[in-house]
């Protein structure tokens, strides 16, 4: 057994069907956790994530829910609890972004982005916290973004709603870490530009500008985020809570 052994733990990863979420699911499963893979629209992609986990020798299940809905979130948790028991490890990764998120953004887009990215995080954390507090043990990682720390100056779209939602996720995690301690540890991970479906439509010129502004001189991979997330959920991070870790190749840094 190692200090990153998650054997016997039940993990829920929202937005786990692809990209960063898929990498986190696979990494937690390799550490021994039974992984509940949440998806909103693509059951096929979630099933592929589960197939990859099983090919690696791990276990899990798939659970459809739009986390912006409190009712769907509750139904998802009830399903996981019926299948495997309470959630021990929670990763709130589900999120959306839009290239219309700029000065001409319609109010409906603002509400949708905030409802998924912020309300969805709240719904899952609030639903998980009661059992975690009762057991006296729980670990939560909220996936934020460097756009929650510093407004974008390299992109033509300014990501007003997205950046605001991700700033709020950081503040929410910090406050929960204080309120839920010592039973539950809560931390944030703020990725930079990561090669996923969400960023595949970015122009080559925009990608080049961001990479040239990044000290590491590359984009990140989903595995970069997954490895840190696994660490923060493990016993190795037992004295870490209320923190935000930036994974951006140095593009954005914290003091």
Image (tube, helix red, strand yellow):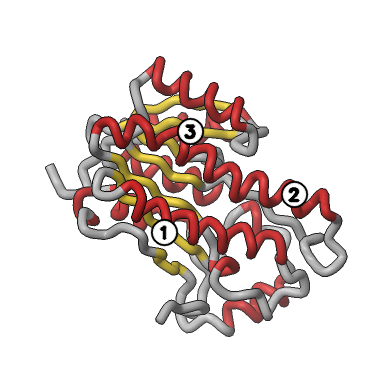
* SS for dot 2: helix
Whichever of labels 2 and 3 marks the residue nearer the N terminus, that label is 3
98 left or right of 76? right
Task: State the image coordinates of residue 21 (x, y, percent, origin top left).
Answer: 50, 46
Q: Nearer the viewer, residue 167 or 22?
A: 167
* SS for dot 1: helix
Q: Residue at x 39, y 17 (%)?
A: 83
Query: Counting other residues with Cα less than 10 Å from the Cα at mark 3, is it few (<14), some (14-19), or many (20 or more)?
Result: many
Q: Quadrant of residue 110?
A: bottom right
Q: Quadrant of residue 213?
A: bottom right
Q: Residue at x 42, y 56 (%)?
A: 175
Q: Residue at x 54, y 38 (%)?
A: 123
Kindly indicate whether the residue at mark 1 contacts the one at mark 2 (C-beta within 8 angstroms): no
Image: 21 above or below 173: above
Task: State the image coordinates of residue 94 (x, y, percent, origin top left).
Answer: 57, 45
Disc nearest the viewer among 2 and 3: 2
Is residue 80 at least partly visible in the picture? yes
Which quadrant: the N terminus? top left
Residue bearing the label numbered 1: 174
* SS for dot 3: strand
Q: CA distance from mark 3 to mark 1?
A: 25 Å
Q: CA distance from mark 2 to mark 1?
A: 23 Å
Residue bearing the label numbered 3: 37
Whichever of labels 3 and 1 marks the residue nearer the N terminus, that label is 3
Task: State the image coordinates of residue 101 (x, y, percent, origin top left).
Answer: 77, 62
Q: Quadrant of residue 33?
A: top left
Disc nearest the viewer among 3 and 1: 1
Residue bearing the label numbered 2: 111
């Amino acid at each position: 057994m190692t200090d990153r052994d998650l054997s016997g733990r039940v993990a829920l990863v929202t937005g786990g069907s692809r990209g960063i979420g898929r990498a986190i699911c696979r990494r937690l499963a390799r550490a021994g956790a039974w992984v509940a893979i949440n998806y909103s629209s693509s059951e096929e992609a979630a099933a592929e994530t589960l197939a990859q986990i099983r090919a690696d020798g791990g276990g899990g299940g798939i659970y459809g829910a739009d986390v912006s809905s409190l009712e769907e979130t509750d139904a998802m948790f009830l399903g996981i609890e019926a299948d495997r028991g309470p959630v021990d490890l929670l990763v709130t990764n589900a999120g959306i972004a839009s290239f219309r998120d700029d000065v001409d953004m319609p109010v409906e887009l603002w509400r949708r982005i905030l409802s998924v990215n912020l309300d969805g995080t709240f719904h899952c954390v609030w639903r998980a916290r009661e059992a975690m507090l009762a057991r006296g043990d729980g670990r939560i990682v909220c996936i934020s973004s460097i756009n929650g720390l510093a407004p974008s100056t390299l992109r033509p779209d300014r990501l007003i709603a997205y950046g605001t939602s991700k700033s709020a996720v950081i503040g929410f995690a910090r406050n929960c870490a204080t309120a839920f301690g010592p039973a539950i540890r809560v931390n944030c991970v703020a990725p930079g530009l990561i090669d996923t479906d969400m960023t595949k439509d970015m122009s080559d010129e925009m990608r080049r500008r961001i990479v040239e502004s990044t000290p590491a001189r590359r984009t990140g991979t989903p595995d970069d985020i997954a490895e840190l997330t696994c660490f923060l959920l493990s016993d190795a991070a037992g004295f870490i809570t209320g923190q935000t870790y930036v994974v951006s190749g140095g593009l954005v840094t914290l003091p």
